[in-house]
Amino acid sequence: MNKTFNYSINANDIIQSVSDSFVSFANENLESDPNPSENTFLGKSVYEFITGNEVKHLYQLLIEQVRTTSKNVVIPYRCDSFTVKRFRELKFISTLLGITHGICQECYDKANRVLTS
């Protein structure tokens, strides 16, 4: 099953669009808004939704690299819960209007496993 959670930002790092799947993902994970909608994100800085100065700085560096080089960046990472091991990819994709960023699970669902102690 292919799951992608996408949003696009402009040159000022303001969110211009979000996918329906992103809103669903936010509904499960956003503590500050119990019922997020597209309007929760549109017109706001992407950094309002990123926790931690180090993570914000990493995003700034990655976004700047994509803008400067016009080359996409893909970073595989693990996102485990207490019971499931999840492998995902973080993608920053350069576009003419800005950057489309998404968390993609593509073929990684097959790798999800129940963790044992």
Image (tube, rainbow, N blue to C red):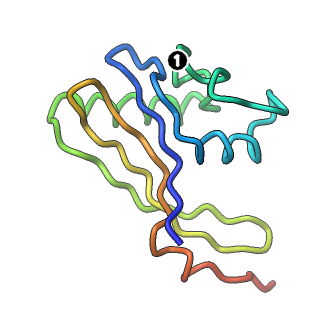
Dot 1 surroundings within 10 Å: few (below 14), some, or many (20 or more)? some
What residue is at 62 percent from the left and 78 percent from the top?
Answer: 112
104 relative to 32, above or below:
below
**Farthest bottom residue in view:** 116
What residue is at 53 percent from the left and 72 percent from the top?
Answer: 1
**Side of 17 where 63 appears, left or right:** left
Front residue (pair 89, 8): 8
**Side of 38 where 29 appears, left or right:** right
**Farthest left residue in view:** 69
The picture places residue 98, in percent across and down from the top left corner, at 30, 26
Tell me the element at label 1. Answer: loop
44 relative to 102, above or below:
above
Image quadrant in which the C terminus is located: bottom right
Please name the amino acid that badge 1 sits on.
Ser
4 relative to 88, above or below:
above
25 relative to 7, above or below:
below
The picture places residue 105, in percent across and down from the top left corner, at 50, 64
**Side of 106 where 24 appears, left or right:** right
Q: Quadrant of residue 12?
A: top left
The picture places residue 25, in percent across and down from the top left corner, at 66, 47
Front residue (pair 91, 15): 15
Front residue (pair 7, 112): 7
The picture places residue 116, in percent across and down from the top left corner, at 78, 86
What residue is at 35 percent from the left and 32 percent from the top?
Answer: 61
Q: In which quarter of the image is residue 94?
A: top left
Residue picked out by circle 1: 45
